[in-house]
Image: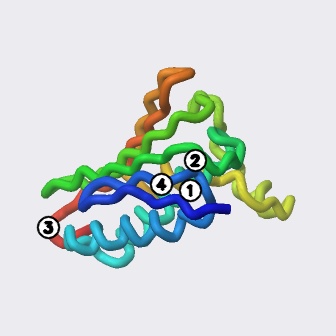
């Protein structure tokens, strides 16, 4: 398979929908969040939430098709660190995903399926916007106080 070059600048990364690109996404988020002065714990939470969002895009929106576009745009300011993720894959309604029964989940030995829950738990604000047949956007925001938390 031919390697595809990603497009990147300080606040934007465009990659193909391949699981091997998740490492580049994590590195991109880590660099920007570190530069913004966030704590390691907050950075790790943002990275995990973004990783879950992008994994869901690869698995569900693009059904593992390796040539889908994922565009990640960072919108940091003094009060909020926001990550916007756009894809052009299949749309879905996030409101139909119920919160998991974690005890039942553990008892059943399940693996996976907690992406939405993790995003909502790790981030302060999660917003979805979709135009079916055109694009999907998820916005993940973390509020920042003066201590980088």
Q: CA distance from mark 4 to mark 1?
A: 16 Å
Residue placed under numbered mark 2 in the picture: 116
In this rendering, position of residue 18 left or right of residue 49: right
Along the line of sight, the residue nearer the viewer: 142 or 68: 68
Which of the two discs, 2 and 1, labels the residue nearer the N terminus?
1
User: Can you tell which mark lies on residue 146?
Assistant: 3
Q: Residues within 10 Å of mark 2 (few under 14, many from 20)?
A: some
* Eye-nearest disc, 4 or 1: 4
* Eye-nearest disc, 4 or 2: 4
On-image quarter of the N terminus: bottom right
Residue 107: percent from the left, percent from the top? 83, 62
Secondary element type, mark 3:
loop
Which residue sits furthest front?
Answer: 2
Which of the two discs, 4 and 3, labels the residue nearer the N terminus?
4
Which residue sits furthest right?
Answer: 108
Which of the two discs, 2 and 3, labels the residue nearer the N terminus?
2
Q: With respect to residue 123, does 146 lie above or below?
A: below
Q: Are marks 2 and 1 in contact (CB under 8 Å)?
A: yes
């Amino acid at each position: 398979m031919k390697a595809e070059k990603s497009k990147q600048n300080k606040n934007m990364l465009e990659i193909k929908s391949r699981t091997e690109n998740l490492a580049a996404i994590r590195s991109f988020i880590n660099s920007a969040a570190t530069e913004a002065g966030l704590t390691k714990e907050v950075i790790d939470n943002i990275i995990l939430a973004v990783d879950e969002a992008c994994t869901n895009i690869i698995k569900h929106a693009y059904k593992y098709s390796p040539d889908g576009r994922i565009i990640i745009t960072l919108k940091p300011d003094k009060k909020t660190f926001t990550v916007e993720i756009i894809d052009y894959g299949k749309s879905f309604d996030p409101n139909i995903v119920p919160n998991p029964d974690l005890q039942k989940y553990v008892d059943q030995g399940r693996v996976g399926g907690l992406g939405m829950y993790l995003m909502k738990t790790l981030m302060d604000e999660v917003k979805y916007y979709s135009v079916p047949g055109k694009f999907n956007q998820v916005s993940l925001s973390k509020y920042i106080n003066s201590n980088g938390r």
